[in-house]
Amino acid sequence: MLHALVLSLSKFIKYWVAYVKIAVNTRLLINHKMEGIQWFTFETLKRITKAHPEHTFYFIFDRPFLKDFIFSENIIPIVIGPQARHPFLFYIWFHIQIPRVLKKYKIDAFVSPDGFLPLKSNVPSLAVIHDINFEHQTKGIPFWAAHYYKRYFPKYAKIARKIATVSEFSKADIVDKYDIDSRKIEVVYNGINESFKPITDTEQQLFRNHYTQGKPFYLFVGSLHPRKNLCNLLRAFDLYKETDTTQTQLLVVGSKLFKAGAIFKTFKKMRYRDEVHFIGHLLAEDLHTSIASAKGLAYVSFFEGFGIPIVEAFACHTPVITSKTSSMPEVSKNAAILIDPYSVKEISDALKKLDNQPTREHYIALGEKRAKDFSWDKTARRLWNTIDSLLPKNE
């Protein structure tokens, strides 16, 4: 009896000593608006909070939240305004409101999956800086947003106790641009949702029947934004169609972001625009079906910190065409056709290359192998190890 009491007491003491309060910026968890950073936030936090019931996590939202985002009983949701969707409101939310929350709840560590940090706080912080594309090209970013990013992200990188990022390319870029000690930055990579896998021929045909009149299609996935290089893809598709005998279509999945006007001007000038279909944002299940049904993914951005659709396509046994710039060669390794995103002809030639079935099968096999290197479980473990390094330790 005494032994059992001592054992229970020791477990209680161990739990009490380990207990810490971790606040997380969850402002980007918004239903029906889930893309790259949002999925990173969702997939990692879902695993981390469930794996560490000994800690309390304070999820800080800037608007009413979906209950599905409260993954476990050790999460306390907090809503504070204003809704941070403009540089002026960024400043209020992160530099005035967040410090108040951290002080009020006596937070031990602050985690920001989108990289924004409170400047006026002594709480140890982790900034997840996925990339700093705005330092290389501001085309397509509203003036005041670009100004804010350029002014404050160097400061965030400096004050962060730790930084996590999603590729070795992004790590090197942050080190070089902001003069940050490389030992402060951990590469955690992105993962692949378990639902991304091959589907049956019947399922593929049903999807094609609905969106492309039953015809095969190449797929673009991403926001309609200049950085995603959709203009050159549209021009390349027009060039490809001049000799195409397969009735192949182009399916564009993604919502308008900033300055998408040039994309639609290019589209209107296309000779084969009737064979291009803009279908907007898709929910996760439909996005998976679109990738798994595609003849190939054309992911030819000018700049990416990672490029999640690349590895999702690999997992779906869909061959990939992607750029030889920024992180994309690192992420795709040797498993994708690499092109110069500034060359319309190279993109067009790559589309033609995937008309050849043995070539398709070759890249499908390479992609299937490469996909095994990525999972959200791995990402969550790596991110947790970085968070854990911030926490107070009681010996």
Image: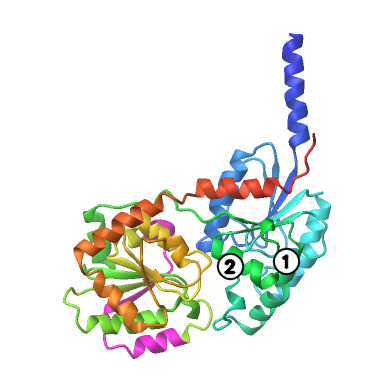
Based on the picture, tell me whether residue 282 belongs to the magenta stretch. Answer: yes
What type is the residue that disc 1 sits on? Answer: Tyr
Q: x, y (%) of residue 354?
A: 25, 68
Residue drawn where x is 75% and y is 26% of the image: 12
Residue drawn where x is 42% and y is 84% of the image: 263
Label 1 belongs to which residue?
A: 156
Q: x, y (%) of residue 35?
A: 50, 63
Q: Nearer the viewer, residue 371 or 30?
A: 371
- Relative to 193, is 86 above or below? below
What type is the residue that disc 2 sits on? Answer: Asp
Based on the picture, tell me whether residue 386 belongs to the magenta stretch. Answer: no
Q: x, y (%) of residue 110?
A: 73, 54
Q: Nearer the viewer, residue 390 or 170?
A: 170
Q: Which mark is residue 131?
A: 2
Sort mark 2 into few (<14), some (14-19) or many (20+) by Cα contacts within 10 Å: many
Work out whether mark 1 precedes mark 2 in sequence or the reverse, and give the earlier one.
2
Sort mark 1 into few (<14), some (14-19) or many (20+) by Cα contacts within 10 Å: many
- Relative to 378, is 225 above or below? below
- Relative to 377, is 36 above or below? below
Tell me where the magenta segment starts and ends, as one range. 262-287
- Where disc 2 sits, the SS reads loop
Q: Which mark is residue 267?
A: none
Which image quarter holds the N terminus? top right
Left or right of residue 87, residue 28 in this image: left
Report the Cα–Cα distance between label 1 and label 2.
Answer: 13 Å
Observer able to see residue 130: no
